[in-house]
Image (cartoon, rainbow, N blue to C red):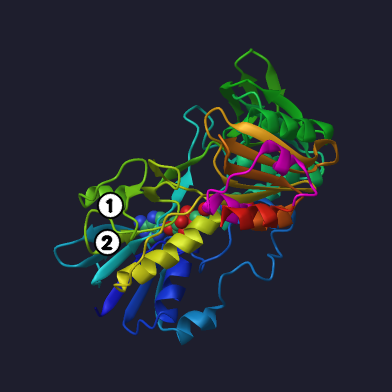
Amino acid sequence: MKSIAVVGANLAGGRAVESLRQAGFDGRITLIGEEPWRPYERPPLSKEVLWDPANVPDNFFLHDEAWYADNRIDMRLGVRAEALDLTAGGVRLGGGELVQADRILLATGGSARKLNMEGTDAANVHYLRTRDDATRMAADLKDGARIVIIGMGVIGAEVAASAIKLGCRVTAIEPFAAPMIRALGPQFGQWLGEEHRQRGVDTRFGRGVNAMRVLDGRVTQVELDDGSLVDCDAVVVGVGIVPETSLAKDAGIVTNNGIIVDRQCRTSNENVFAAGDVAEQDSFFGGHIRQETYQNAADQAQAAALAMLGQDVDYCKPAWYWSDQFDLNIQFCGHIPAQAEVTLRGDMASNQFTAFFRSGETIEGILTVNRAPDMGIGKRLIERRAKASAGQLADADVSLREILKQAG
Ligand SMILES: Cc1cc2nc3c(=O)[nH]c(=O)nc-3n(C[C@H](O)[C@H](O)[C@H](O)COP(=O)(O)OP(=O)(O)OC[C@H]3O[C@@H](n4cnc5c(N)ncnc54)[C@H](O)[C@@H]3O)c2cc1C
């Protein structure tokens, strides 16, 4: 094998090219990315970049420019891959150029889902996926500005926290009864909603949006489904992502919610692989899942790189993610099983606790709030399908390491 093309130059694409070289691949690597930037970190976009867009954190980029030159990565940035040409063996760029490749990795991630209503493209309506999105949004998050947030998933909740920090007046609208409810479940979703309320967010949970009212190209009011109107200077929409599956679909590769891959990260075409937010793979708990987490994008891309080189790979990990909001570091690993038994360690009132979600005796999900050390061991408890009683988990004198040891 002489050449590999990676489509998508963000986290998964960036980690994949790194892993290819680390594993000793000496052939041609082309990294094709639609954004003008070399691979960078998205987590700071809802935090540090909004606070101060002119000064991105030191470790914002995965590597400096010299690294790509030193590692002979042929960078095609600001360029969209238009099609896979599986007959000619490569990726077709805009303008018709063919990047020839024996193997292709699709690391195309997703783009922010747009609201389907008048005003969705107004100048003061913001979506957050890219660095450029964050820079534009930051200009509207001014002290005293009235910001309406539509959708209180992770992105909406993080932007709400940043907007409060910047002195904005924030109204958050969420059709579910609490923020991040699908990720945290109702009990901890309610807890998080209360944290937002206490810090000044005007929470309108259990409410949808009927319309946005536009005046001179800007949205000035948002109408809720109870008929109430909220005045605003800007709107932030956080209603999920649409996975970028079109290259695969158009080439006849099997897709569902994402691009279907096996545990080698191989698609239905033997020379095409996929990793990161766009890939749908076996879930650790059965069925299929498309994860939208940082760690998965990094680890799955590494697995895909090794598999493309012919190494034996069997990638299947439980999800793990973190979210920073106000002074809360929230981490979750695994999933919340149906009819979960919930056990608490620590103190919710002081925002330092760990919650365990069990199916029978087996720990399948762990939530930590300002207790990151528990997550270090917690991840391993989930991976080993460790069992424990509610008494052991609730008792802070029983170390999680001990429970891990018992799991063997
Ligand atoms: C604001 C924000 C904060 C986040 N915070 C956290 C966090 O705290 N914790 C956590 O676990 N996760 C977080 N995430 C999620 C995490 O960043 C993603 O899971 C990760 O970026 C996925 O990486 P990816 O490379 O698979 O996809 P993406 O990051 O979506 O990158 C895909 C790239 O492919 C490019 N592309 C797509 N189609 C084409 C094409 N046809 N041709 C060329 N290029 C193309 C896109 O332009 C994009 O640059 C956050 C995400 C955002 C947006």
Quarter of the figure with residue 347? top right
What amino acid is labelled 2 in the image? Val
As drawn, 154 above or below 339 = below
Measured as percent of width and height from the top left, residue 197 is found at 79, 31
Task: Identify which residue is drawn at 58% across, 45% down.
Answer: 387
**Which quadrant holds the N terminus?**
bottom left
Q: Is residue 390 left or right of residue 263?
A: right
98 and 102: which is toward the camera: 102
Dots 2 and 1: beta carbons under 8 Å? yes
As drawn, 198 above or below 247 = above
Measured as percent of width and height from the top left, residue 11 is found at 50, 62
As drawn, 122 above or below 206 = below
Measured as percent of width and height from the top left, residue 255 is found at 29, 45
Asked if residue 10 shows in the view, the reply is: no
Q: Is mark 2 within 8 Å of ligand 1?
A: no
Task: Identify which residue is drawn at 58% across, 38% down.
Answer: 361
Q: Is mark 1 within 8 Å of ligand 1?
A: no
What amino acid is labelled 1 in the image? Ala
Give the residue number, with chain letter if any, for mark 1.
248
Quarter of the figure with residue 335? top right
User: Is label 1 in a helix, a strand or a loop?
Assistant: helix
Give the residue number, with chain letter if any, for mark 2.
272
Task: Identify which residue is drawn at 56% across, 57% down.
Answer: 408
Few, some or many C-alpha atoms within 10 Å of disc 1 (few <14, some 14-19, many ≥20)? many
131 and 382: which is toward the camera: 382
